[in-house]
């Protein structure tokens, strides 16, 4: 699968950390491309509780999905309920300071490629 996404800021991480019930329903539970509130999103099944990218950032996986979501979809109320905060484009647990996910800015349109257990988002490579 290869898809092109528009430039902008995107959340990369576990969707359960930032989406409400309706958003999670739209995203589905098996991965793929979808739209939430008219915005293109993607999710990918993972076999682990954490995934790292080629820059060395480690993402915590709540359930089984790693999501790519426009940052505008991050629900502030959900963050408050889960005692999470975003600082310097990184999603943290407020108490432990543990890094869970991040927001990445893409200055131009970018491709997302997924095959087997290999995912590439622009220049970031993942083994999921």
Image (cartoon, grey):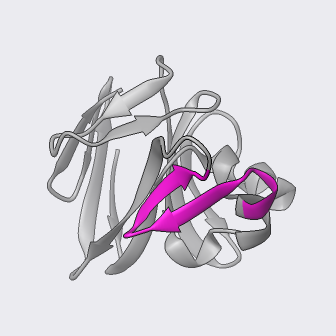
* Residue 6, magenta (yes or no): no
Q: Is residue 21 above or below residue 59?
A: below
In the displayed structure image, the side of residue 61 where residue 24 appears, left or right: right
Residue at 22% across / 82% down in the picture?
107
Residue at 26% across / 74% down in the picture?
106
* Residue 81, magenta (yes or no): yes
Residue lying furthest front: 95
Q: Residue 96: horizontal and vertical position, in percent?
A: 55, 40
Residue span colored magenta = 80-94
Q: Residue 18: horizontal and vertical position, in percent?
A: 66, 57
> Quick one: quadrant of the C terminus?
top left
Q: Residue 86: horizontal and vertical position, in percent?
A: 52, 65
Seen from the viewer's position, the closer of residues 122 and 84 is 84
Q: Residue 53: horizontal and vertical position, in percent?
A: 24, 40
Q: Is residue 78 above or below residue 58?
A: below
Q: Quadrant of residue 7?
A: bottom left
> Quick one: quadrant of the N terminus?
top left
Residue lying furthest top: 47
In the displayed structure image, the side of residue 121 where residue 86 appears, left or right: right
Q: Quadrant of residue 84?
A: bottom right
Residue at 43% across / 27% down in the picture?
50
Q: Is residue 66 above or below residue 24?
A: above
């Amino acid at each position: 699968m290869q898809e092109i996404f528009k430039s902008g800021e995107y959340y990369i991480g576990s969707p359960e950390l930032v989406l409400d019930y309706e958003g999670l329903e739209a995203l589905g539970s098996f991965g793929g491309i979808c739209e939430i509130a008219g915005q293109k999103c993607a999710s990918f099944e993972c076999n682990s509780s954490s995934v790292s990218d080629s820059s060395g950032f480690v993402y915590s996986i709540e359930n089984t999905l790693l999501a790519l979501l426009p940052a505008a979809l991050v629900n502030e109320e959900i963050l408050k309920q889960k005692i999470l905060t975003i600082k310097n484009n990184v999603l943290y647990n407020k108490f432990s300071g543990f890094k869970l996910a991040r927001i990445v800015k893409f200055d131009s349109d970018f491709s997302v490629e997924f095959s087997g257990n290999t995912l590439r988002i622009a220049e970031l490579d993942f083994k999921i």
